[in-house]
Amino acid sequence: MAFSTGGRINTNISAQQAYSALNAISREHGVHQLRLATGKRINSASDDPSGYVISKKMEARMRAMTSAVDNVGDAQSVYGVAEGGYQTIADILVSIKEKQARAANGAMGVNELDAIASEINSLASEIDDINLQTKFNGVALFKQTTGSTLYSTNFQVGESSTEKLLVDFTAVTGATSLLTVAAGSVTSANISTLDVDAALNTINTAIGKIGASVNRLTIKEANLSTAITNTEAAKSRIMDADVAKEQIQVSKLQILQQTSTAQLAQANSAPQNFLALFR
């Protein structure tokens, strides 16, 4: 670094050096003030190029996982709607089982048996209605007959597009498939042939699968939440400013600004001392 001997006044080296130092301190002071204002250590790529790139990758990962959490919630909602439909069908089947047992009473006359058959027909029709009306976002979830469309949808439940969970409902739950007799075709003569126990087993198995799948989704949701928190913490260590440290730097630089300004003023006035030589 060049230093002035003080005797040359045409070029004030000391003033120029003090001015350069003041500019450098002011720039650094501005950087730390911005960090305090935004709470971020990295406000532009020039602050830390590699840290900026890494933090953006982490931010993309967090957003993908946040969307995956929403997807998990939607999948849980689908299962919740389906479970509600299955449980209602199971309750109806229990009622049919009760009517079937009542019809086996030898004291029943023809009129009583016809009344029971009519009631079972109504319950079977309600099963078909539930199959048609159990929907999520306008899409039917249940298979009413063997040849009907199967609900089968993939939900992305992780950061990567390959992390998917298939949500489907394979049980055929139409009245005809469950009871082996179509709704409206139950008569006093075929009440005893209704295979209600097998129907209940089909529905209960489907409910059990939903329960297992919901538990799996709950675990995925907890795991994603933990991953998001950990990624956020890692990003914070890179991006966020240490407020206490930044405030210390600002205080130091404010003092240096004041001393640099004072030195600049002194350097500008120093050549005037040589005027005494002309007296």
Image: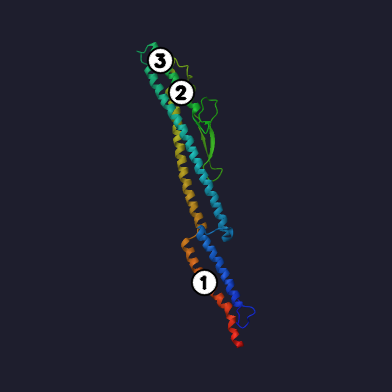
Residue beneath the point at 51% across and 35% down: 167
Q: Residue furthest right?
A: 10
Left or right? Give the position of 98 relative to 132: left
Q: Position of residue 176 (x, y in %)?
A: 49, 21
Closer-to-camera residue (240/267): 267
Q: Nearer the viewer, mark 2 or mark 1?
A: 1
Earlier residue among tags 3 and 1? 3
Q: Are marks 2 and 3 in contact (CB under 8 Å)?
A: no
Q: Are marks 2 and 1 in contact (CB under 8 Å)?
A: no
Secondary structure of the residue carrying numbered label 3: helix
Q: Are marks 3 and 1 in contact (CB under 8 Å)?
A: no
Instruction: Kindly identify which numbered label has been placed on residue 115.
Output: 3
Residue 172 appears in view: no
Q: Position of residue 174 (x, y in %)?
A: 49, 24
Q: Nearer the viewer, mark 3 or mark 1?
A: 1
Label 3 Cα neighbours within 10 Å, binned few <14 / some 14-19 / many ≥20: some
Closer-to-camera residue (28/86): 28
Q: What residue does disc 1 label? A: 258
Q: What residue does disc 2 label? A: 126
Quadrant occupied by the C terminus = bottom right
The answer to whether residue 213 is above or below residue 200 is: below
